[in-house]
Image: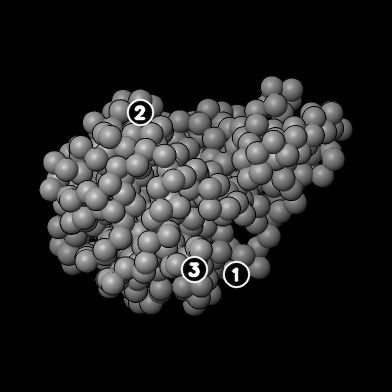
Amino acid sequence: MRYAPAILVGRLTRFAARLRKPGGGSAVPGLVVNRLAPGYLTRTLSGFPQGLVVVSGSSGKSTTTKMLVAILRAHGIDVFTNPSTANISQGLTSALLERADWQGRVPGEVAVLEMDEGHGALVMQGVDARVVALTNVMVDQIDRFHDSEMVAGMLERIAARAHEAIVVNADDAYLERLAAKAGPGVAVRRFGVSADVLARSPRGLGYTETTGGRLGSSDGVVVASVDGAAAVLRDGEASVEITLPARGTHYAVDAAAAYATAQAVLGERFAASTAADALSAIPAVFGRGERVTVRGHEVEFVLVQNPASYQLNVDSIEPGTEQILFAIGSDVRDPSYLWPTDASSLGRVSIVSGSKAAEAALMLAYDGVAIDRVEPDLGQALDDFLAAPEPGSGVKTIVFSADAMRRTRAHLGLTGAE
């Protein structure tokens, strides 16, 4: 009852924010409630009957979370989860408000939450999790995370709140060192790729530090093979065939992470066939290799967030794609940290846009990419790009940073829940 006034104010704030900006303002109600009732988030996260499951890491959080939720729901579990855009403290509170009753109670047997590395380390103070799943440690936004040691320290603080199990990427040396610090009674589960999959990834897996050896199938869930959007997971003696939401080894690794985490959560209730069916049925998370029809055209959205995801996702674009819009927004405060990547495989870009259009165009030019036009106005660039005739090869492809993704989504009216 003590949170009822704050819940009411938060809901009124949400209503006002959406009147002002349809599809936007999602974090504002959470910011208000966190100020009025600072204990609401902690108390609510601790109140789910089957506990809390947290997914964090430099990259792959959104897709792994969506996959894990699909598996758990396929097993009949009532899951509360947050959209991938709501992974910081005020966003998490806003997501809870969406489902909360007037007393602030949120339905669901278990909460599965994606958490930003930095905010998660703060949110989890005083909150216990049943299971914590960690995807990887990569060179990330240099204005927030100065080095990988800093990121690893944040993930260690999140993992320290797990009281049943932590699930780690065995190919990431930082996470393997973190796993060695697991407390008594906390199980460690692992996922990773086979030697063959790693050998077929000439640029590696994108982690700051990759372990020297590969995970054996008796020690965890292994990505045995990847062919486009088809993959095989090896779980002990069993081979599990799945269809991925998009092309790329990194999506197969996300699937292995979700599969291993679901095993930790479900225990004896876990069924491999149910998990495989659930993984194969989910669509891509918005912007992560997703294909949708917009204004009569099939369009593929490709999100790049740090140097590793930039490289992996650009490399996954089908060779010969004729029409590409490349947009970098204000979230990339210093584009120089993307310069070590190589976008030469793009060949040609139709339009470069966003608030960092000039810097992005220079970077692409140094990679030998031909650029037809630079248009800083993203709305104009999108309209012109979609008005052009169908490409002769591939589909219209939009590569964007997180800020440009949000602006693209709003401009095109793609405002539904992710």
Q: Residue at 19% of width from left, 60% of height from top?
A: 201
In this picture, is 30 found above or below 346? above
In the rendered structure, find residue 296 and report the number of the disc placed on it: 3
Name the amino acid type tagged 1.
Answer: Ala
Left or right position of 387 against 205: right
- Residue 225 on image: x %, y %: 27, 71
Q: Residue at 24% of width from left, 31% of height from top?
A: 336
Dividing the picture into quarters, in which one does residue 138 lie?
A: top left
Q: CA distance from mark 3 to mark 2?
A: 34 Å
Q: For the N terminus, which image quadrant? A: top right
- Residue 269 on image: x %, y %: 58, 68
Name the amino acid type tagged 3.
Answer: Gly
Q: What residue does disc 2 label?
A: 333
Check disc 2: other Cα within 10 Å, few if <14, some if 14-19, many if 20+: some
Name the amino acid type tagged 2.
Answer: Arg
Q: Nearer the viewer, mark 1 or mark 2?
A: 2
Q: For the C terminus, which image quadrant? A: bottom right
